[in-house]
Image (cartoon, rainbow, N blue to C red):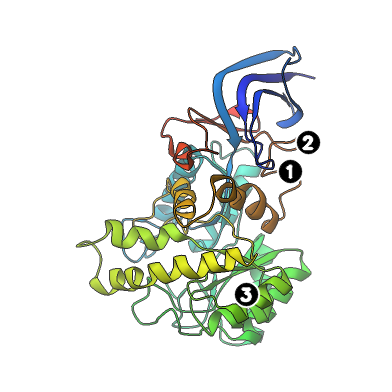
Amino acid sequence: MSKTTYTNFTLFDGKNQTATQSAWFTVDDATGKLDEVGNGSAPTTDKNVDLNGKYVMPGLVNCHTHICMNPLKGDGGMNVNIVDATVHAVQHLHELLKSGVTYIRECGSSYDIDIYLNELHKQGELKKVPDILPSGRPYSMTGGHGDFPNFGHLVDSPDEMRKAVRTGLKKGAMAIKVMATGGVMTPGDFMDDPQLSVEEMKTAADEAHHKGRIIAAHAEGNPGIMNAIKAGVDSIEHGFYVNDEEIDLMLKQGTYITPTFVADWAIPEYAKGKLPDWEIKKAADALQDLYKNIMHAWKRGVPITLGTDAGTPYNDFSMTPVELQLMVEQGASEFEALQTSSQNSAKLMKIDKEYGTLEPNKYADFLVLDNDPLTDIKAVQQADKAVYKNGKRVY
């Protein structure tokens, strides 16, 4: 049984608050999993790799992406044919992995492309991409936030929702995404517009949970956030206007929240003169509210996950490390920001037994950095960092 030992690095394992100096770990080459982790004198194995005193941390788990979208178009570039969408999706997966993201939860793909790409990846036909937890198309009311060409399943009753979700699960969706409110990208609705009803979303949650799957709700304002929590979703996505009553219920039910700070930040930062004024104004007006309300929820104990909404306007597929920076700028420590990925995203996605932290019997998905991410979160933004998947270097 062939093994590779990596030596001479400082290790942040994703779990412990302090890094381990003079660290080493051994990878089972056949499984791609960590066999042993230690420090000091390292064992001699079939292959030994010296990491030259650099810093090692777990690969990032981004639990909110849209690989079919085009971040350079205000509508997400979703009105394209399936070939165009697939080519861009594969390109975006490569960009995510190069940025340090080794696992994603896709939160809505045109044509169910993420389901098909996930199958190709599992068969070994699609290489140098993150692992994928696919959702297929999201579920939206007619005229709602997901009503884009070739994108949303349009449902307008609990029975229509039940049929649509069962169909999505049959196709291979491993996560379900529902639209509880309006949003930034659609001109005809607003963040505080409730969309899918409690009954419709509860039907989706029941069907997902019957299959052991998870369900996320796009929910930016009220009463849509409360509707989604009452429906029993596992995570609130965005949550701009989450309030204390909703936080109380989230804490009781164990609901996660995915802020996607960078998605809102990027629009006023990069899109002036390129997107319609109404879209920029929507994002800019809400940004400080987003920061304030999410950090309040976090301080009260709601688990915050790492997700970026990658693919939305000017929010490209390299931006995951910037989400960590924004979390730190709002008052989290570097360690706390990194926990959104290594602990919370992995737990929400139910992959934490094998991913998220660098411990024995977990996959050797890791990044090699020049600087210490526990003292400067911007270290994760290093453009030429080494990225390893299953113990093998991919970038």
Label drawn at residue 354? 1
- Closest to the observer: 71 or 290? 290
Q: Rate crowding at label 1 as few (under 14), some (14 to 19) or many (20 or more) other CA atoms within 10 Å.
A: some
Label drawn at residue 247? 3
Q: Residue at x 54, y 68 (%)?
A: 296
Q: CA distance from mark 3 to mark 2?
A: 35 Å
Instruction: Check disc 2 and report its element: helix, strand or loop.
Output: loop
Q: Where in the figure is residue 14, as x and y percent of width and height? A: 65, 41
Q: CA distance from mark 2 to mark 1?
A: 7 Å
Instruction: Check disc 3 and report its element: helix, strand or loop.
Output: helix
Q: In screen coordinates, is 156 left or right of 20?
A: left
Q: Is residue 320 above or below residue 73?
A: above
Q: Where in the figure is residue 325, as x and y percent of width and height? A: 45, 49
Q: Quadrant of residue 78?
A: bottom left
Q: In screen coordinates, is 321 left or right of 51?
A: left
* Label whose residue precedes the other's in the sequence (2 or 1): 1
Residue designated by label 2 = 361
| Residue 162 at least partly seen | no
Q: Rate crowding at label 3 as few (under 14), some (14 to 19) or many (20 or more) other CA atoms within 10 Å.
A: many
